[in-house]
Structure formats: C-alpha cells, structure tokens
Amino acid sequence: MNWVNDVIQGILLGGYYGIIACGLALMFGVMRIINLAHGDIAVLGAFLMYLLLQHWSVSPFIALLPVLPTMILFGYVLQRLVLQRSLRAGILTPLLATFGLSIVIQNALEQSFGPDVQSLGGQAGSLVTAAWRINSQISISALGGLTFGAAVAVYAALQLYLSRTPSGRQMRASAEDPDTAELVGINSRAVYARATAIAIGIATLGGLALALRSTFSSYSGPDQLIFAFEAVVIGGLGSSLWGALLGGIVLGVAQTIGSQINPEWSVLSGHIVFLLVLISPRGGLLTLRSGRRAPASLPQAGT
Amino acid sequence: MSFLELEDLTLRHGLLEAVHGVSLELGEGEVLALVGANGAGKTTLLRGLAGAHRPAAGRILLDGRDITRMPAYKRVHIGIALVPEGRRLFANLTVEENLRVAACNPGRGHWTLERVLEAFPMLGPLRRQRAATLSGGEQQATAIGRALMTNPRLLLLDEVSLGLAPIAIEAVYASLKAVLAEGTTVLLVDQDFTRAAAIAHRVVCMLEGRFVLEGKGSELTREQITEAYFGLGRTVETTA
C-alpha cells in the first residue's frame, strides 16, 4: 500500500516538474533554443511575488496577478532584444546568451534579496497543510493536487492554443520551417517573441509552485533547470507537447520511489532514470511509442 | 507605370553572382514564363522577388514603390506570393492548416478556404490529412493553394511540374487556368517549356544569370529557345 502512495505522490510531484518543463520544451520546440536561464527565470518570478508580499499581506495567488503579466512582458522583450539577435549567429550563441543571463539573474537576485532561503508557503494559509485523506496510508495534499491540476490545465491550454488558434498555427508553421513561414506572410520574429513570452509566463507559474511547496534562494534556478531538462528529455525532446508532462511524472515517481528505498536516493534515482532514457536506443518515452519520428519541429529534410 | 519593375537587379550566393543586373517590366495581369537551364538563376530571381533572398544591387518596384529591402512576410501582405521549389509544405500541419495558416489580406481578393478547395477539387477529401502524407501532385496543389490564400496580386510559381507524374501535371495546370482567369499577374518558372509557353503571354529565357531571349510564346521558334537555353550561339562568340 505504501508503494501506491509513493506513486501517487510521485505523480503529483511530476505535475510540478511538468510545469517548469513546459516553457523549456516550448522554446526548444519552436526556436531550438535551450534556455539555460529557465530555472532562474522561474526563481525570479518567485522573488517578485516575495517582494510584493513584503509590502502587502495578501495571498501569493493575488501576488501572481501583477507578476505574471510583468514576466510575460519580460519574456517578450528578452526575445526581441537578446535571443533574436543571438539566434542569427547559429545554434550555440543562444545557449551562451542564456547561460550569461542565468548568471546575471542569480547575481542580481543575491544583490537584491541576499543569500537567504525564502518560501511563500507561510502566506498561503491552510492550502499548504490541507490534505485529502483517502485511507490510512494514502493522502493527497491540497497543494500537490492543485499543482498537478494546474499542470494539466497549462498543457491543455497550450494544446488548444497551438491547434485551434491562428496564432498557434503560425507558431507551429514557424517551428517547422521559419523561412517558408515568412513566405506565407508570417512574421517569425513576432511569433518567436510570443513563444518566449508564453514560456516565461509558464515558468512564472512554476516559480509560484516552487515557492509554495518548498523553499527557494537566489541560486535555486539551476536545480529547477536540471529537473525541467530531464523531464523534457525523458518525454522525448519536444517531439510531443504532452511528452514533457509525462517526463515530469516519470521523474517525480522515480524520485519518490528512490527516496522510499533510501532517503538519500531521491534525486539520484531521478538522474538514473534520465540517464537510462538517454542511453536507450530510441531515447524518450513518446518517441518510443510513436516509432522513430523526427521531432515535430525539425524542418523536413529534402524539401 | 508598370505593375512590377526590376532595375539592374543583382543577386549573389556569397561570391557567386547568380543573377547579373537584370531588368524587367511586367504589366498587371500579365503571365510571364521564365525558362532556362539548371543554374541559370531562375529560382534565385524568384526568391529575390519574394524577399527570401536579399539583392546585392538594383531595385524592385511594385506599383512604383521601392520594395527592395522589404522583408518577405511584409511582401506577402502587399500581394507577392511564392510557391517555392520543392513545395516546402508544413509537413506536420494538415492540408487545411497549411492553407489556413497563410490566410491574410482577406479584404483584397476573394480567395478563401472554400474557393481554394473548389479550384483544387483533389484537396477536398484530404483536408484533415498531414501534408507529409500527400503525393507530389497533391502537395503541389496544396502549395499553390496556400499561396492563393494570401490573395496575391503577383504569384511566383517555381518549378510547378518538377518531379510530378504527367497526370498530376495535367491536373495542376488545369487548376492554374482557374487562377489565371482571375487576372492575377503570374511569373512562372518551369522546365516544361511547351506547357509554360502555352499559358504565358511572354517568355523570357535566362542563361547564366542574364536574360538572353524575350518574346511572345507563340512567336519564338523552338530553335531560338534551344539556342538561348543552352547558350549555343554565345559560346561560339566567346571562343572565337
């Protein structure tokens, strides 16, 4: 029975990983940018909410309302001013640019907020402690359930956006072949800026989830990035939208089961699963299922 | 004032000059066929007109307006659409999505999803299929349809019949007739000279980046075209 609980807790944890992986997968899928500052951006969002809560005693969810649009705007400007320029110089330059951005954000946060560990859990009231007790061994925390629900909602909303709206169709077209997209009247730069804005908005949600369920400091970003990156790779590297959520769930389950065997093995067992997927001949869960298909966003060769 | 004007347009691929200072005037509603051997610079010229290739020198004027430096997506909005060589469909989008994603300028022309599907009846049953699963002829029809969805005033067609079965070429050209009936200005590149000349008002032959022969499709003899196409007369001159 304990195992069942572990798996359930792992799935809920996977919801959190799914949220932080989502923006990373979107940016990789649309622009082939691996955003090494993704975790730091999530932490930046958490600190902005922390800053607001220093002055107003409101719920962190209220603090999200002004922070989310601010971060979305930040993403848009970041793409237009920094990443778009770096994209022109090949695939390696955006990697270096985001690596630099990561260092800038970490140091700026430490300058502004100091090295202390923070959490927004205290301001969230009973949400953090509440739980639904299923039976004597299984209980679902309200926060875990809410995070998982939010993850599913984020992925479903993104799926609807990409498949049903003209703007989403433009994003898929640009992801596949930016040159041809321009030839049918799509401004690829504007599409890219939209993609980064969305990715960073979702990262901010991840920052809130992190701040509520755990603690964060100026240097928490890279850890979040690693988990997000592992989730994306386990899910099949942007070959499918839901892959990153599935990858997050696999990672979460691996970590909770690992920690049940030995508390020190929690993070390690997640890494081991990641490495196993990485060295497996197909690589990635969803690529395994749908056969060896090229990532959806790669330009088709020979056309 | 002519509809489209090229003034000494030069296009380069790095050090290689693919198009050497060509000039051309095209009236509204005119259909021009561009013929020439591989490497003559036809595709580069078309990509230069569409904005996918930045000219090294010269000017492009549409309605007298200089659009030489205008990015490709903005040229689509003022009415230039290219059907690129090799179709270049969005393989993971369905046929309908490929068409819809190009929908812009709804006020100008009357091409809508319904009209395009009417003009290319073979696409109707394929609407929900991924473009990657289509045959060559179906892909070409989708690519032309996609360009029409932008309601172009100038349609650039690159190698429409390349790699297609004769029956597919037949179908594509039959549908093209419906497009021509709308009075759209067309610049057409095709290896199939007879077919291209049949629907064109004027034929221009390109050789090594220059226009070497120009005339009405019906007036040019096969010998003239062959000579210009392979540069036979010119070779004699230069070696002599």
Image (tube, coloured by chain):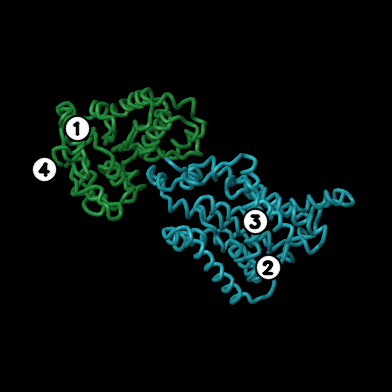
Mark 2 or mark 1, whichever is nearer to me = 1
| Percent coordinates x, y for residue B36 in the rendering | 24, 37
The quadrant in which residue A62 appears is bottom right
User: Which numbered dot is residue A216?
Assistant: 2
| Percent coordinates x, y for residue A85 in the rendering | 42, 61
In the image, B222: left or right of A173?
Answer: left
Specify whether residue B66 is in view. yes
Mark 2 vs mark 1, CA separation in Å? 75 Å
User: Which numbered dot is residue B194?
Assistant: none
Mark 3 or mark 2, whichever is nearer to me = 3
| Chain A tint as drawn | cyan
Mark 4 vs mark 3, CA separation in Å? 67 Å
- For the residue marked with disc 3, what is the amino acid? Glu
Mark 4 or mark 3, whichever is nearer to me = 4
Residue picked out by circle 1: B226
Residue at point 67% right, 55% down? Answer: A275
- Label 1 and label 4 in one chain: yes
Compared with A84, B107 (above or below) is: above
Mark 3 vs mark 1, CA separation in Å? 61 Å
| Chain B tint as drawn | green
For the residue labelled by badge 4, is the local secondary structure a helix, a strand or a loop?
A: helix
- For the residue marked with disc 1, what is the amino acid? Thr
